[in-house]
Amino acid sequence: MIDSKRIFVDADACPVKTEIKKLADEYGWHVCFVASYDHRPVDLNDKEDWVFVDPGRDSADLYILNHIHSDNLLITQDIGLASLAMAKNAHVISPRGKTFKEDSIQTALDFRYLSALERKKGNYGKGPKTFTEEDRKRFIKTLCELLSNFEGDSAYTSN
């Protein structure tokens, strides 16, 4: 049986793990945190489901892609992983509360590619913006809205 009320979290650098667990519990969703052994938290909670994978670059991504199903949720800041999960009809949001959509994912992938080309030339940008309390609030709002859309509705339809 496929568990449709399941949230996968690309947990290596996720700043909103506590919020995810709290909201998942409120809405009756199961959370699976996926991280490499290199990022194993020291304060693991027995009530949380953690999967640890080899420290290889794409190990967590591969685990998630092999286990995620249609109408599952994924929380990641990895645009490549987001696009692959969306191809499996999963719903994807970033820890900053951005919802990944079909009509904009290709543009995000293109920018990621161009940034990689620049880094190969030695041109490094500023890096990601600092995670703020506003980002956290936006994430909570987005996740609440997404989980609410599933309430009493077995087939989620996005606007």
Image (tube, helix red, strand yellow):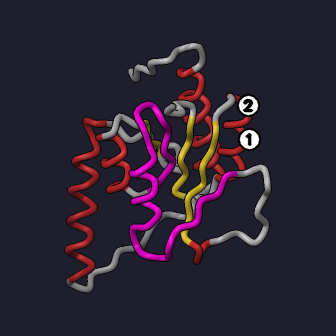
**Residue located 58% across and 41% down the image:** 138
Q: Quadrant of residue 27?
A: top right
Q: Is residue 62 magenta?
A: yes
The relative height of residue 129 versus residue 49 in the rendered view (above or below) is: below
**Residue located 58% across and 13% down the image:** 152
Q: Left or right? Give the position of 107 relative to 16.
A: left
- Disc 2 marks which amino acid? Glu
- Disc 1 is placed on an element classified as helix
**Residue located 64% across and 57% down the image:** 50
Q: Quadrant of residue 105?
A: top left
The relative height of residue 119 versus residue 142 in the rendered view (above or below) is: below
The residue segment tinted magenta is 49-77
Percent position of residue 95, x then y: 54, 51
- Disc 2 is placed on an element classified as helix
Q: CA distance from mark 2 to mark 1?
A: 6 Å
The relative height of residue 116 versus residue 112 in the rendered view (above or below) is: below
In terms of depth relative to the viewer, which is nearer, 97 or 28? 28
Task: Check the picture and name the quadrant holding the C terminus.
Answer: top left
In terms of depth relative to the viewer, which is nearer, 124 or 105? 105
Residue found farthest to the bottom: 122
In terms of depth relative to the viewer, which is nearer, 128 or 100? 100
- Disc 1 marks which amino acid? Lys
The residue pinned by badge 1 equals 22
**Residue 13 in view here:** no
Q: Are marks 2 and 1 in contact (CB under 8 Å)?
A: yes
The residue pinned by badge 2 equals 26
